[in-house]
Image (spheres, rainbow, N blue to C red):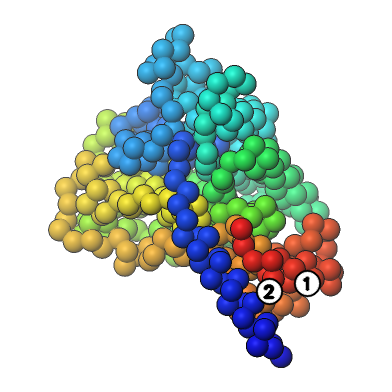
Amino acid sequence: MFTRSAWCRVLFIALVFALATGASAQVARLGAVGDSLSDEYFEQSYAYAKNWTMQLVEYRAVDMGPTAQAAGRPGGTWGEPRRTGYEYNWARYGADSGSLLAEGQHTGLAAQAGPVGGGGGRGVTHAVVAIGANDFSPTTNAYFSLYWGLWSQSQIDSYVAAQVADVNAAVQALDAAGLKLVLGNYVDFGIAPVTRQIYTNASRRERITAVIAKVNEEIELIARRRHLVLLNLNAMGTTIFGTNSSLRQYLAIGNVNIQLFNRDTASHSNPLAGFVDDGAHPHTSVQGVFANAVMTALNTGWGASYPLFSDQEILSHAGIAYGGAETLAAHVGPYSQYVRTFRCPGDYNGDGHLAVVDIFEYLNAWFAGNPGTDVDGVPGLQVADIFAFLNAWFAGCP
């Protein structure tokens, strides 16, 4: 039973939290690590399209640094893995969680977090980590083996553990550098036309989806333990494209149907397609939806104030005429549902509010054996996790 003094303490903490989360934390310079979802499309054969990084830079004046050419770099390139793109965007086409580390995406961006001047610091304050799709791309042995049921459970567990360890290593380096992180979870390649062309059985593709869900449980735990902002790209992908057994054919943006089953041509004859001509990469319109999700994560989690793209703007960026009505929200819902902020350890449900309900939800999850309740840093669920959580709850939020 709460005493009056205990309730006063709860109310005081909630007030402090509300004031703290209302403070501004504008993004001075934004960095990114990841794969071709974030790597600038202008470096690819499908340069007719624009991904989320390009749209944020071009239409919201987000500072991701100059291109290599604009910076006067010899040969117009930064060298691998950045090549010719923005200075603070280390995402590389074809990268997976292992090659991200091998290529030094994480250490390169971490070095840019320091003050401008000696040591490579460039004043980068925030970063998006969006890696993992290529760990389960249709060209990998992992996808083939899971699809055909060739791996034992121990092999699956080992593969999952290895990918999670790679992501955690990258996040650890970026977090230690002081970057304010948005951590995206793994998206599922199974909905892409190129995957469905090769692997036609929906129930077998669902085997990969189930393993990706296990990885994403661990990704959420990384975000929780390190007090980061989690962007659920996987859930957003499912909302947009549907599931393996129930795919959506259209996405209505601005009262115009984007053709999710279709891919554009190399000559860019079908801007209404959901994918570029390779059938693997989301086209400009779909990337505009991802851009809104990233801005929501920065706004909600880190106090930025970017105005989201309207349907009309998204279509305009894709060279598509507006259909006269804002229809996207009815299909994807509020972007906030894809964002969870774990900046405050006591805010268990990640809704941005410290309340008694966080305690009840935590205890229910702990007794259910939810791995997300392992918060004391020691592997496995123990009573010590409960005490660690309660201490964090009573400590309030920074």
Q: Which residue is mark 2?
A: 362
Judging depth in this view, the residue of 325 and 343 nearest the camera is 343
Secondary structure type for disc 1: helix
Question: Is the Cβ of the residue at disc 1 closer than 8 Å to that at disc 2?
Answer: yes
Q: Is residue 370 left or right of residue 272?
A: right
Instruction: Determine if residue 40 is in view.
Output: yes
What residue type is disc 1 on? Ile
**Label annotation for residue 376:** none
Left or right, residue 125 beside residue 265: right
Q: Residue at x 46, y 9 (%)?
A: 74
Residue 394 in the image: state x and y as whole percent: 69, 71
Amino acid identity at mark 2: Tyr
For the point 50% across and 18% down, the residue is 78
Q: CA distance from mark 1 to mark 2?
A: 8 Å
On the image, the x and y values in percent for residue 272 come to 26, 47
Return the x and y of residue 139 as percentages of the image width and height: 58, 38
- Residue 77, given in percent of the width and then of the height, sits at 47, 16
Query: To which residue does mark 1 refer?
Result: 386
